[in-house]
Image: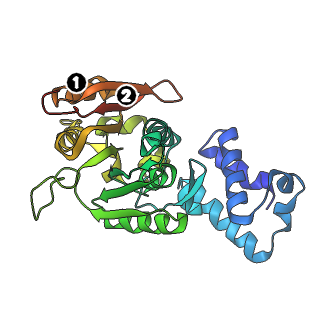
């Protein structure tokens, strides 16, 4: 099989530029080929076993399966995370959210020689990309992460181990965040962050099939009649679980940006700030817990 024979059939699903990008990613990750190798014709020099492997990769891609699932890996913020169909594929937009948190909160963990741990909770961790990134990029952080999916927690734990991140993972429901044994809010956090399910079911018609057909719907969709469901539950929890002055961050459905801002204000949060992503969409929001109950 030549490089052209590998990528050209993919144009039945993707435009030519994206098909080539997917092909280059597959050849790089699966066979260690650079673009120079590809141009020198090394695709045609694969062994029989390697050629069979390449054919299987193409077969899966032609069924619409995302290349990250086919390869078992996704780049996120310069690190490689293992992914499977049980977790969402990490998005560049979510990496932007992590960058905002690191830039805003990372320096607070070191104050001259007075170093203190920053306590962070990631709700709905999926592959662990947010929790692991913050654990590695914020000095002296103490990071916990929740997910309701046992499959997601297995993948996240494996990612934390392979990347050398200290994260405590727990099976917890974002819609029932209080610990069942105590029904109490404990411990307190300096930062709570979540990229919750926020896509309307009615948006399915405009979604690409390789997302709709393979990524976990549990992590994608909120009910059409209550799209604020997760934002409400997490905001109410954060209002009591955050330390005074602590920060809450969400990734947003741009259609809900104004509603989430109003929700946070009604919960008593201050300094509500919405930020656009690299495409100009209202994608992220930050709010601060009051410094004291009387603030």
- When asked about the image quadrant of residue 262, the answer is top left
Left or right of 184 in this view: 214: right
Left or right of 36 in this view: 223: left
Q: Is residue 196 visible?
A: no
Spatial CA distance of label 2 from label 1 is 14 Å
Foreground pick, 34 / 123: 123
- The residue that disc 2 covers is 254
- The residue that disc 1 covers is 262
**What count of labels does the image hold?**
2
Foreground pick, 192 / 251: 192
- For mark 2, does the 10 Å Cα neighbourhood hold few (<14), some (14 to 19), or many (20 or more) residues? some
Quarter of the picture containing the N terminus is bottom right
Foreground pick, 250 / 29: 250
- For mark 1, does the 10 Å Cα neighbourhood hold few (<14), some (14 to 19), or many (20 or more) residues? few
| Mark whose residue sits in front, 2 or 1 | 1
Quarter of the picture containing the C terminus is top left
Q: What x and y, as percent, mark residue 268?
A: 17, 29
Q: What x and y, as percent, mark residue 278?
A: 53, 29
- When asked about the image quadrant of residue 172, the answer is bottom left
Q: Is residue 188 visible?
A: yes
- Which residue is at a point 22% across and 30% down the rendered structure image? 269
Q: In the figure, 12 relative to 132: above or below? A: above
User: Which tag, 2 or 1, sits closer to the chain's start?
Assistant: 2
Q: Residue 151 shows which numbered tag?
A: none
- Which residue is at a point 33% across and 44% down the rendered structure image? 191
């Amino acid at each position: 099989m030549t490089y052209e024979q590998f990528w050209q059939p993919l144009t039945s699903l993707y435009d030519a530029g994206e098909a080539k990008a997917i092909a280059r990613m597959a050849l790089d990750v699966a066979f260690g080929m650079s673009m120079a190798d590809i141009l020198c014709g090394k695709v045609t020099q694969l062994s029989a076993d390697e050629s069979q492997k390449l054919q299987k990769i193409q077969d899966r891609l032609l069924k619409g399966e995302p290349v990250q699932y086919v390869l078992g890996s996704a780049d996120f913020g310069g690190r490689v995370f293992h992914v499977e169909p049980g977790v969402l594929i990490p998005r560049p937009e979510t990496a932007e959210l992590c960058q905002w948190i690191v830039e805003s909160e990372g320096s607070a963990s070191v104050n001259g020689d007075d170093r203190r741990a920053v306590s962070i909770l990631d709700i709905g961790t999926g592959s662990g990309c947010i929790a692991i990134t913050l654990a590695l990029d914020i000095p002296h952080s103490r990071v916990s992460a929740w997910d309701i999916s046992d499959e997601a927690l297995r993948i996240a734990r494996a990612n934390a181990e392979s990347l050398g991140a200290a994260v405590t993972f727990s099976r917890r429901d974002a819609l029932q965040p209080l610990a069942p044994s105590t029904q109490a809010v404990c411990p307190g956090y300096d930062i709570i962050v979540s990229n919750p399910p926020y896509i309307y079911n009615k948006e399915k018609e405009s979604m690409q099939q390789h997302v709709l057909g393979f990524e976990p719907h549990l992590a994608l969709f909120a009910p059409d009649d209550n799209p604020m469901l997760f934002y409400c539950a997490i905001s109410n929890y954060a209002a009591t679980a955050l330390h005074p002055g602590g920060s809450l961050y969400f990734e947003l459905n741009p259609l809900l940006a104004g509603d989430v801002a109003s929700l946070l204000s009604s919960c008593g949060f201050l300094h509500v700030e919405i930020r656009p992503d690299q495409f100009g969409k209202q994608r992220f929001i930050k709010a601060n817990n009051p410094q004291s109950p009387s603030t």
